[in-house]
Image: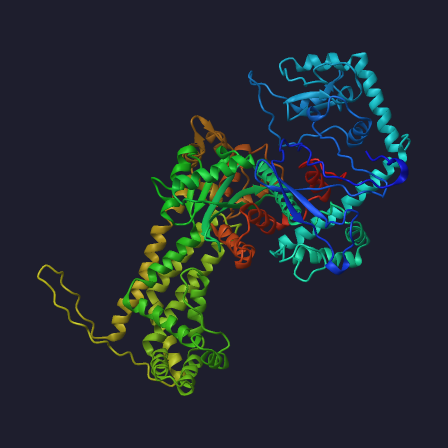
């Protein structure tokens, strides 16, 4: 509480050090950082003639947090440190100022997701103890029952403040959970407890009505509290805005009104131009030089961590409500050459209607990328967030051996701990490997890819050549990339649809360049682009990549379901099989049309066979083709398409196996004409899949009967559509086993595209100029940016409460 200083003069405020944290963290070291202040020509000297400093304390967890001093509410006010929220940390003799502050704040509330520790007898505190059940069945709230995480015990809030008796409920707390009910009933009937409750209610009423004796001081305290809450709301809003846009916070200077003081302080200065609250705050910093301003980079780190922690708590609550989840992992190196693992969780969310959500949980710096270390790291992360791994029902990774290895990979190690967490390889990575296999299937395929790269390299090698290219074409040439999968289709399309323009660009470049080597190269590439062989290859590759790219883009969606993914892959195989029958003839016809546009003869020249000496044990070579067109069909077209078909069949075998284990849950169109024996077989397979050590998620026979009693379903009903049907008609209690099985089936991931997208944010956040960023700050900024939809809906009052609860602030919040 604030008190007036005798004599009406301002006393100098010394730094008494940081107070103990209510969360059990204590400062262990102290560092000094220059406070944000006006430019040198705008500074005003303090009474001591020294510059304002800002202190920081390092917590026991290694996180730097600001140790601030409370600025005076007016010139005649001194500092007051508010008491902790945990009653176990209250002093033995409570001062009047602390008592007023505690009553104004009210009893300490435990988070709903808090896990109460169990005693030696296996018992623990339960929230039902906060209510008293009357003989008529009504419940009366026991607002005086306060749980202390520090002592794992309960206190009487009123008696702790007003009673003079030394009992367990006021001294060390009551933790005998086997006899807690009788103890609370006996205590609430005592006369001393009743008198303490009357005193508590009387003081609380006086404070609310403004009838306290020291009301003037309390009014000043409340005004000061309101001012700092308004300031923190604006600082939190600035932090959220910068983090959601992946912008840097700090500059080369940490002082206000300097050119290079970073985006955070510039936003503060801009806001102060139009906002009276921030204008008054900066005026106090400028003229009074307070020790507390909450503008230092340590406070920025705290604000980032508070927003990201609250975002993660919201996500964890969604996961706990959904219960079942799947994990998606992927790794990449950042600009500091550190291996960052992205952790994604996929759930079925029920906010308004059933929907598939994939949430980002943060980056983890992994030192070793072995299957053992990666599996231990992800298990520790889930344990840290309070997400039970036994509820995991799926896992998806890329095609790395350390991830999908059947013996020592991450999926194998996690399957040993939880056999119900089925592994599905990334569909997008698999589709990429299908194209990679097709590109290596024949010499002509490899040669065509090489020529595409040469075309791009020639024009990108000099600005003069690139200017010539852009003058002729609307779509510039693209490089054939092994990482950016969609660029492959773009590189082929740019040549396929602009063959004449690309050839004209080479002819002009041949005349414009002075380098004789470049002239020869331009002439050779112009002849190659206009060759009948190159045109046929362009048409074939364009058609093949168009078919696979459509499926690939759909597979990368975070809402993709396993049943729809299997249908898309089957349709891709059917289309490729049809193209295998008549695709080459269509490609030849399209190439002849291009030849007419180029005014060249559609003639395919046969290449001379290179003769090599063979030993006796070698197999007999195939008969040479007399027709060059037939040879191109066999050695190029058939090899490319057959290789793509075989890769699709082989690489998606695991996905098909997972689909078969869930049976008709992923395709309800088969239920209508299915016999009871087949339906029983499918339900038994699902029951077996979701059973471990005698514990099952569903009952197979009951689910079979529920499916039999389902109404007539439309054809091609997906699992998500069926789940929405049950939810909209409130049929969860009618079909409980089917309801659970559908939720689990929809959590099965298809791709790791969400993890790949998080790496794009990583490159935006941790740039070359921000390469020294700490891991906690990096992960916090990424959580805010990627989960922006959740972060934007957070309550500023809750964030300020978290900010105040981290340690005892010198400013009343």
Residue 741 position within the rendered picture, expressed as x and y whole percent measured from the top left: 50, 37
Residue 631 appears in the figure: yes
623 is higher (above) or lower (below) than 73: below
Taking the view exactly as shown, the residue that stands out farthest to the front is 49
Placement of the N terminus among the 4 image quadrants: top right
Residue 135 appears in the figure: no
- 137 relative to 718 in the view: left or right: right
678 is higher (above) or lower (below) than 464: above
Placement of the C terminus among the 4 image quadrants: top right
- 203 relative to 122 in the view: left or right: right
Residue 53 position within the rendered picture, expressed as x and y whole percent measured from the top left: 70, 47
150 is higher (above) or lower (below) than 367: above
The answer to which quarter of the image holds residue 522 is bottom left
Taking the view exactly as shown, the residue that stands out farthest to the left is 616
- 162 relative to 306 in the view: left or right: right
What's the image's color scheme?
A: rainbow
Residue 393 position within the rendered picture, expressed as x and y whole percent measured from the top left: 47, 38
- 224 relative to 501 in the view: left or right: right
337 is higher (above) or lower (below) than 193: below
Q: 398 or 25, which is in the foreground?
A: 25
């Amino acid at each position: 509480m604030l008190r007036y200083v005798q004599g009406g003069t301002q006393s100098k405020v010394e730094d008494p050090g940081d107070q103990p944290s209510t969360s059990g963290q204590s400062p262990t070291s102290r560092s000094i950082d220059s406070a944000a202040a006006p430019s040198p020509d705008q500074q005003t000297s303090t009474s001591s003639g020294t510059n304002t400093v800002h202190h920081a304390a390092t917590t026991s967890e290694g996180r730097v947090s600001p140790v601030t001093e409370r600025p005076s509410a007016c010139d005649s006010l001194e500092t007051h440190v508010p008491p902790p929220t945990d009653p176990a940390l209250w002093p033995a003799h409570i001062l009047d100022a602390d008592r007023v502050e505690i009553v104004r704040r009210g009893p300490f509330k435990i988070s709903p997701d808090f896990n109460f520790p169990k005693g030696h007898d296996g018992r623990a505190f339960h929230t039902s103890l906060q209510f008293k059940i009357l003989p008529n069945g009504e419940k009366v709230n026991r607002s005086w029952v306060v749980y202390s995480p520090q002592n794992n015990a309960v206190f009487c809030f009123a008696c702790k403040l007003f009673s003079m008796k030394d009992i367990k409920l006021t001294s060390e707390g009551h933790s005998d959970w086997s006899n807690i009910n009788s103890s609370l009933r006996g205590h609430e009937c005592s006369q001393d407890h009743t008198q303490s409750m009357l005193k508590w209610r009387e003081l609380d009423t006086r404070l609310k009505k403004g009838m306290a004796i020291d009301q003037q001081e309390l009014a000043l305290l409340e005004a000061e509290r309101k001012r700092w809450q308004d300031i923190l709301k604006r600082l939190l809003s600035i932090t959220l805005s910068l983090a959601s846009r992946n912008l840097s916070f700090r500059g080369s200077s940490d002082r206000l009104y300097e050119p290079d003081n970073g985006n955070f302080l510039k936003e503060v200065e801009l806001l102060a131009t139009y906002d009276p609250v921030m204008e008054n705050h900066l005026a106090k910093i400028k003229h009074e030089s307070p020790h507390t301003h909450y503008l230092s980079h340590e406070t920025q780190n705290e604000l980032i961590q508070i927003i990201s922690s609250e975002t993660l708590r919201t996500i964890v609550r969604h996961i706990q409500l959904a219960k079942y989840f799947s994990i998606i992992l992927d790794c990449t190196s950042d600009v500091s050459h550190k291996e960052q693992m992205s952790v994604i969780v996929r759930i079925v969310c029920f906010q308004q209607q059933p929907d598939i959500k994939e949430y980002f949980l943060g980056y983890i710096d992994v030192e070793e990328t072995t299957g053992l270390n990666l599996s231990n790291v992800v298990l520790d992360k889930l344990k840290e967030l309070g997400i039970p791994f036994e509820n995991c029902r799926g896992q998806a990774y890329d095609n790395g051996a350390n991830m999908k290895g059947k013996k020592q990979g991450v999926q194998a190690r996690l399957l040993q701990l939880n056999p119900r967490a089925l592994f599905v390889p990334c569909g997008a990575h698999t589709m990429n490997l299908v194209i990679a296999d097709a590109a290596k299937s024949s010499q002509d395929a490899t040669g065509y890819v090489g020529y595409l790269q040469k075309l791009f390299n020639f024009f990108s090698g000099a600005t003069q050549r690139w200017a010539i290219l852009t003058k002729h074409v609307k779509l510039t040439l693209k490089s054939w990339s092994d990482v950016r999968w969609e660029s492959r289709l773009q590189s082929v399309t740019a040549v396929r649809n602009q063959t004449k323009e690309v050839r004209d660009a080479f002819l002009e470049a041949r005349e414009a360049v002075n380098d004789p080597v470049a002239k020869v190269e331009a002439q050779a590439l112009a002849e190659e682009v206009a060759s009948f062989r190159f045109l046929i290859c362009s048409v074939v590759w364009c058609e093949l990549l168009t078919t696979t790219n459509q499926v690939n883009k759909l597979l990368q969606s975070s809402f993709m379901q396993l049943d729809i993914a299997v249908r898309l892959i089957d349709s891709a195989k059917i289309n490729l099989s049809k193209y295998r029958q008549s695709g080459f003839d269509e490609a030849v016809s399209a190439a002849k049309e291009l030849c007419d546009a180029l005014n060249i003869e559609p003639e395919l020249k046969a290449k001379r066979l290179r003769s090599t000496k063979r030993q006796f044990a070698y197999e007999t070579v195939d008969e040479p083709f007399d027709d060059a067109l037939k040879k191109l069909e066999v050695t190029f077209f058939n090899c490319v398409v057959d290789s793509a078909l075989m890769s699709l069949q082989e690489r998606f075998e695991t996905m098909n196996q997972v689909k078969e284990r869930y049976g008709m849950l992923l395709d309800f169109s088969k239920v209508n004409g299915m016999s009871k024996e087949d339906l029983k077989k499918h339900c038994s397979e699902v029951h077996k899949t979701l059973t471990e050590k005698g514990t099952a998620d569903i009952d197979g026979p009951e689910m079979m009967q529920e499916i039999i009693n389902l109404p007539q379903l439309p054809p091609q009903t997906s699992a998500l559509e069926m789940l929405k049907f049950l939810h909209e008609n409130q049929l969860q209690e009618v079909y409980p086993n089917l309801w659970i099985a559908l939720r689990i089936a929809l959590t099965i991931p298809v791709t790791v595209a969400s993890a790949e997208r998080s790496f794009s944010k990583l490159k935006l956040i941790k740039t070359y100029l921000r390469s020294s960023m700490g891991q906690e700050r990096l992960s916090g900024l990424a959580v805010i940016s990627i989960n922006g939809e959740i972060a934007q809906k957070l309550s500023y009052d809750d964030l300020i409460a978290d900010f105040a609860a981290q340690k005892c602030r010198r400013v009343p919040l």
